[in-house]
Amino acid sequence: MQSHRIIKIAAVAVEWQDQGGRRRSMTARRSDEREVFAEILRGCQSADEVPVIITRPTTVPFELACHIGRAA
């Protein structure tokens, strides 16, 4: 039998403004925030275009599948 539980895990909310002036945002697990920063920087055309990046701690829902039953 399988049961599903929703838990909240630590995350980071990332906001920045792209070259077109549009505000962008993304939420990532704490362990993935470096990849988010790398993705933002890859979108920059030159080192002079590095945007201001605002981060804040948050949580995101995460679904756990729990197997319930007797051990074999």
Image (cartoon, grey):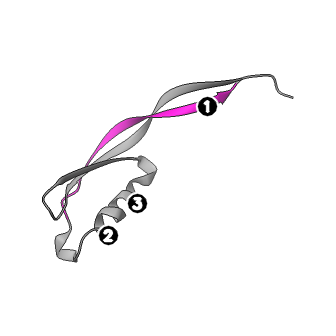
Q: Amino acid at mark 2?
A: Arg
Examine the structure image and report whether residue 64 is included in the region drawn in magenta.
yes
- Indicate whether 65 appears above or below 24: above
Q: Is residue 40 left or right of residue 6?
A: left
Q: Which residue is mark 3?
A: 35
Marks 2 and 3 in Cβ contact (< 8 Å)? no
Q: Residue placed at 57% from the left, 32% from the top? A: 64
Which label lies toward us, 3 or 1? 1
Q: Which residues are magenta?
A: 51-67
Q: Which residue is mark 1?
A: 65
- Indicate whether 10 appears above or below 41: above
Give the SS element for disc 1: strand
State how far apart marks 2 and 3 are (Cα): 10 Å
Q: Residues within 10 Å of mark 3 (few under 14, many from 20)?
A: few
Q: Where is the C terminus found, in terms of image quarters? A: top right
Marks 3 and 1 in Cβ contact (< 8 Å)? no
Which numbered disc covers residue 42? 2
Tell me which label, 2 or 3, sits earlier in the chain: 3
Q: Amino acid at mark 1?
A: Ala
Give the SS element for disc 2: helix
Give the x, y percent position of residue 54: 22, 51
Examine the structure image and report whether residue 30 is included in the region drawn in magenta.
no
Q: Residue placed at 12% from the left, 59% from the top? A: 21
